[in-house]
Amino acid sequence: MGHLFNRAALALCCAGWLVATGPVLAEEARPEPKPLKLTTTADHAKFKELQKTFNSGPEVTKACLACHTEAAGQIHRTKHWKWEYLNPDTKQTLGKKTVVNNFCISVASNEAACNSCHIGYGWKDASFDFKSEENVDCLACHDTTGNYKKPSGLAGNVVTKDMEFPPGSGKILKAIDLSKIAQKVGKSSRDTCGACHFFGGGGDGVKHGDLDSSMSAPEKELDVHMDATGLDFTCGTCHKTSSHDVAGSRYTPTAKDSKGAHLRGKTDNGNPATCVACHNNAPHKSVARLNQHAGKIACQTCHIPSFARGGIPTKMTWDWSTAGQLDAAGKQITKKDAKGRIIYESRKGDFTLGENVKPEYVWFNGNVTYTLITDKIEKSDQRVPINKIGGSPSDGKSMIWPMKVFRGSQPYDPVNKTLVTPHTAGNDDTGYWKNLNWDKAIAVGMNTSGHPFSGKIDFIKTEMSWPINHMVAPKEKALGCAECHSKDSRLAGIQGVYIPVRDNNKLLDTIGWAVVFLTLIGVIGHGAMRIVTARRH
Amino acid sequence: MAERIYVFKRFERFWHWSQAGLIMFLMLTAFDIHGTYTIFGFEKAVAYHTTAAWTLIGLWVFAIFWHFTTGEWKQYIPTTEKVVAMMKYYLVGIFKNAPHPFRLTTLRKHNPLQRLAYLAILVCVGPLIWVTGVLYLFYDQWAAWGLGSLSLEWVANGHIAGAFMMLAFLIAHVYLTTAGHTPLAHIKAMITGWEEVD
C-alpha cells in the first residue's frame, strides 16, 4: 500500500516537472535571433540622412554633425587635426606641420601628398581653414568597410568620380561609394589607425618598425594583445580616447609610469596607454626578481625582443645624398635587393631595410628635444639628433628603453647651418621627386615653410629615435636572462648600472683563478712528493 | 694495533655530506652564472643556485642547533698549541713517515690547523658569501632596509671573491682527506663515524 503510494507520488512529481519545464524546452529549441555585431546602439544604415549620394567628404561630415553636434569641435582641439603640439616641458612647438625628420623630411610645400593622412579635407597649403567643421574627416577613423581611401596628391580629399591622376598619366583613381561607407561607420580599428600609422614615412612599415600592416590582423606571436583570434585589442583599447583626443604621445612619452594600474573611479590624469596602466608596477607573479628588474627596465625592453617581426621590413637607413642618379637614357632608376625590395630610388637615394631587428637600448626619461628648422646645427663626426632622447642612469626618472634608431643623410644649409624643408612631392616644376633638382626643390620648400635659405646645399648625417612599444611578444618569447647577463650583452652600451656577468671584474677573476690554480698545483705537488717519498721508505 | 674511536656522530655525518653535496652544486651553478661555462645556462643556474642556497641555510639552522646543544661548537675554538708542529709535519714530516703530531680524541677531533682553517671558513669566507648572497637575493629591498647606498658591484664582487676562496678551500680540504694513516682513512671515518688511531 505504502509502496503504491510512493509510486503515485513519483508519477505526480514527474508530471509536475514536465509541466514546469516543458515550455522552457520548447523555447530553447527555437532558433536564436541572429546576434548583431554592432558595438553601438545605433545602426547608421537606418538613418535617412545617410541614405543619399555624397559627392564629397565634407558632405558626409555635414550629415554626421547634424547629430554629433560637438564632434568637430572636439577634433579641432587635437594633434590629429592641428598637426601642432606645444611640448609643455621644452616649450618647443612640434607637430607634423612643424617638425623635420630624416624620412620624407617635412610637410611644408608637400601638403597635397602628405596630408592624405590628415583627418581633414583639402589641406593643400597654408590657407587651410582649421576652423572649418565640415572639413573634418570623420570617416578616416570611423570607416569599417576598408573601402575608404584618401589618395596621395589630393590634399586629403576623396574620389567620388573616377578620375585620371596625375592628369595626363593615364592612371585612373577609382571612385568610392561614400554613402555605403557612411552607413557602416563604427569605432576605430587597427585598420583605420593603421591606414596612416602603418604606412608612415612613405610605405608599409617604413617608419616605426613596430607598426606595419602585419599588425592589422596579427597572430599571438606578433602581438599578444592585438592577436586577432585572441585578445583582439584595437589601438584604442590602450590609446583610450576621450573627447576624440587620443592618449599616448611620441612628443611627450611616459618613460616611467610609477602610478600603478588605472582603476575605475580613481581620478587619474595619467597616460592610459602605458603597460603599467593595466599591468601595474609589479606584474611578475612567480619570479619576484623580475619585478626588481622592472624598477629600471621598461617592460618593452624584455617583452619586445625585436621589431619588424611580421614579415614586413622597416627602413633602417636613408641616404638622400645619393639621390639623383639616372640611367643611360636619362630616366629615374630603382634598385632592388635579392628579395625584390627597393633599396635605391633616384628620387630618394639609398635605403637599408631590416626585419626582426634587435632594438638599441638607452636610458630614457620621456624628455624628447627636437632639432627644429630654426635650430643651428654643426657638421661633425656626431650625427645630428632629429629628436634627442633625454635620460641618464641617475636622474631617477629614466628607464632602459628599446629604440629603433633611424639613421640618414639629408640636405642642409651649410651657410645658415640649419636643416632644410625640400619640396619633394608634387606634379610641378620644382618637386624633387619629379625633377631631381635640389636647388629648386629646397628654395621653394624653404620659401613655403618661411625660413631663410642661403642657396648652398650640403648633406648632413642625422639620426632619429623611435621608442618601441608595439609587437609585444607572448611571455614565453620575452628576452631570456642571458640576452643581457652575458659578455655580449644587449645592454652593452648602457652605462651607470652593474649588470652581473656583463660587468665581471677581470682583475678579480684573474686573482681568483690564480689562487685556485696555485692551490691545485700545491696539492698535486704535495701529493706527488708523498707518493715518491713513500716508495723510498 | 690501531684503536678505533667514534668521532663523527650520525647527524654530523649527514650534515657533512649533504653540505658537501650542496656546496659542490653551488660551485657548479655559481661558475655557470658567472659565465665561466654553460651547463644549465644563466637563467636555470640562478634558479638552482638560489634553491640550493636556501636548502643549505635550512641545513645550517639544524647544524647550528646541533652544535650548541651538543657542545660540539667547542671543536672550533682555535688553539696555538701544536700549530707549528702540524705545519712542520705537512711540510717535512709527512714525507719522512714521521709520526702525526696530533692524536685525535672525541673531544678534539680536529687537528690545530683544521681548527684554524674551519674557523677561518666559519667567520670569514662563510659570512662573506652568505651576507653578500642574501643581499644579492634581496636587491630590491635594500632601500627599505636602509641600505640604499650599497653598491651592487661590491656585493657581487664580494660574493665572487668568496666563491674563489671556497673553491680553493674545497681543493685543499679534499686533498688533505688523503693525509690520514691510509689515503682513505679520513673519508672512511666521515662515512662510518669511526676513526682508527695509532
Image: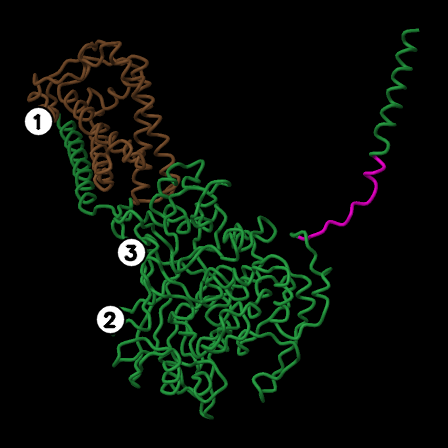
Chain colours: A green, B brown
- Toward the top, the furthest residue is A1
Query: Which one is in front, B15 or A161?
Result: A161
Crowd band around label 1 with a 10 angstrom C-alpha radius: few (<14), some (14–19), many (20+): few
Main SS category, magenta section: loop
Query: What is the chain identity of the residue bearing mark 3?
Result: A
The residue beneath circle 3 is A493
State whether residue A422 is above or below residue A3.
below
Is label 2 in contact with label 1 (beta carbons under 8 Å)?
no
Question: Residue A68, how many percent across, how many down?
Answer: 61, 59
Q: Is residue B72 magenta?
A: no
The residue stretch that appears in magenta:
A25-38
- What residue lies at 70% left-to-right and 65% top-to-bottom? A49
The residue beneath circle 2 is A381
The image quarter in which residue B136 lies:
top left
The residue beneath circle 1 is B92
Question: Residue A232, how many percent across, how many down?
Answer: 58, 51
Is label 1 in contact with label 3 (beta carbons under 8 Å)?
no
The count of marks equals 3
**Label 2 to label 1: alpha-carbon separation:** 68 Å
Crowd band around label 2 with a 10 angstrom C-alpha radius: few (<14), some (14–19), many (20+): few
- What residue lies at 29% left-to-right and 12% top-to-bottom? B9
